[in-house]
Image (spheres, rainbow, N blue to C red):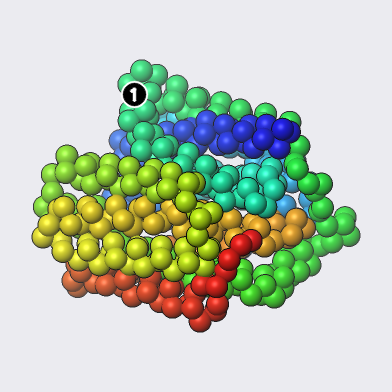
Amino acid sequence: MKKLKEESKLLLGYAISGMGDQFYIFAIPLLMLSKTHSSIIMGLLTAVEYLPTALFGLIIGPIYDIYPRKRIMLISLVMQMLLILCVPILTANKISIYLILLIVFLLGSFDLISWTGYQIFIAESVDTEELSSVSGKVGLISSIQKTFGPGISAIIINLLNYMGGFLLDSLSFGYLALVIRNYQPLHEEKNATAQSSFKKGTKDGIKFLFSQHTIKWLIISFLVANIGFQAVIPMLTFVLKQAMNLSVNMVSIFFTVSAVASIIGNFAYLHLNKKFKIGFQLVMIGLLIALGFSIMLNTKSFIMVTSGYALVSFGSVWSQANFFTIIQAKTPIQYKGTITAVSTSLTRIIGPIMSLVSGVLVNCEVHLIFIVAVICLIGSVLLNFVSGLNNLKEL
């Protein structure tokens, strides 16, 4: 009963703080655009949001393995509470735009710390056999947030202005901090001894990662797949607006269908994932996503492109849930910080580079980004066979 209570508290905390995050994601570009009217600054904003993962993604984890996890998480959440309030204040007082970008960078850095910690805590709130269920619930909450978050954010801005919205965002982090403060893990925390250095903790964690066949090959497989995703995602809006000449309303319909497909994907995962071998799921979902990108090659048809991306969205949430479940199930408590951070970062760190590459590919030929995505997804599936991941049965 206790573990269910802790799991429910963490999920509710994630739901509330996640809606705050959705407001931030919606509002910060609008604020920056209204202040600068500069495409260069908007590009800098995107780069600054990526930067924390590129700089710190591989080194955040050992902090959670060496020091008390709850303390690290609480410090990070409190810093997010305070920093989020600085954004509208600085904007209103016409402070240097670069100082605002610094705040955005710091927010991204603490968000990386908090998200790493949350993944550890939610995994420790349940037994191994329940990991897939809690992973699906986290994915479902995230999909719902992304679907309804922009609309709710627009309503908040109209009713409370930006300051009121950022205040609510700050309070949402405060609520999650209270949840973490009272959190009791299912298993006792096993941090490294006080004599352990950060360097040694990192080295031991990385050594463990490369000694684990399943974790190592899963990360490599997802890294290859993510190259394909990052070839397409940054250019989606450009393709829809410029190459397909769609109206704003049609673009909105496209992303709405995608969001609904994500929600359906999470529901399907929650109800069906335990009925199939994990290895079978890795292969079939990879092929489903590859099929989705293949269908999107028909850029002359809005229905085909939308249907293809719906398949991609459906498969994406399923694959992410499996990734989280396998990583957490195969990692002992003393290495969870390092492995969680490294596994997440390695699959995403290619993002900034591929954002530039995808722009070059689209300028050469629109269909190239989808071809690259298909090749990467098929490559990822082949890696599952080469490494034996396709034979995974139960965790």
Badge count:
1
When asked about the image quadrant of residue 216, the answer is bottom right
Q: Amino acid at mark 1?
A: Ile
In this picture, residue 280 sits left or right of residue 73:
left
Query: Is residue 288 at all visible to an observer of this figure?
Result: yes
The x, y position of residue 342, in whole percent, is 61, 63
The x, y position of residue 259, in whole percent, is 33, 44
Residue furthest out toward the front: 275
Q: Nearer the viewer, residue 222 or 73?
A: 222
Residue that carries the numbered disc 1 in the rendered image: 155
The x, y position of residue 345, in whole percent, is 55, 61
When asked about the image quadrant of residue 8, the answer is top right
The x, y position of residue 14, in whole percent, is 55, 36
In this picture, residue 128 sits left or right of residue 254:
right
> Residue drawn 68% across and 44% down?
126
Give SS at disc 1: helix
Above or below, 113 relative to 17: below
> Residue drawn 70% across and 75% down?
211
In this picture, residue 328 sits left or right of residue 302:
right
> Residue drawn 64% across and 56% down?
328
Q: Quadrant of the C terminus?
A: bottom right
Above or below, 346 relative to 117: below
In this picture, residue 223 sits left or right of residue 179:
left
Q: Nearer the viewer, residue 329 or 85?
A: 329
Residue furthest out toward the bottom: 386
> Residue drawn 47% across and 28% down?
166
Q: Quadrant of the N terminus?
A: top right
Residue furthest out toward the top: 159
When asked about the image quadrant of residue 318, the answer is bottom left
Query: Is residue 103 at all visible to an observer of this figure?
Result: no
Q: Residues within 10 Å of mark 1 (few under 14, many from 20)?
A: few
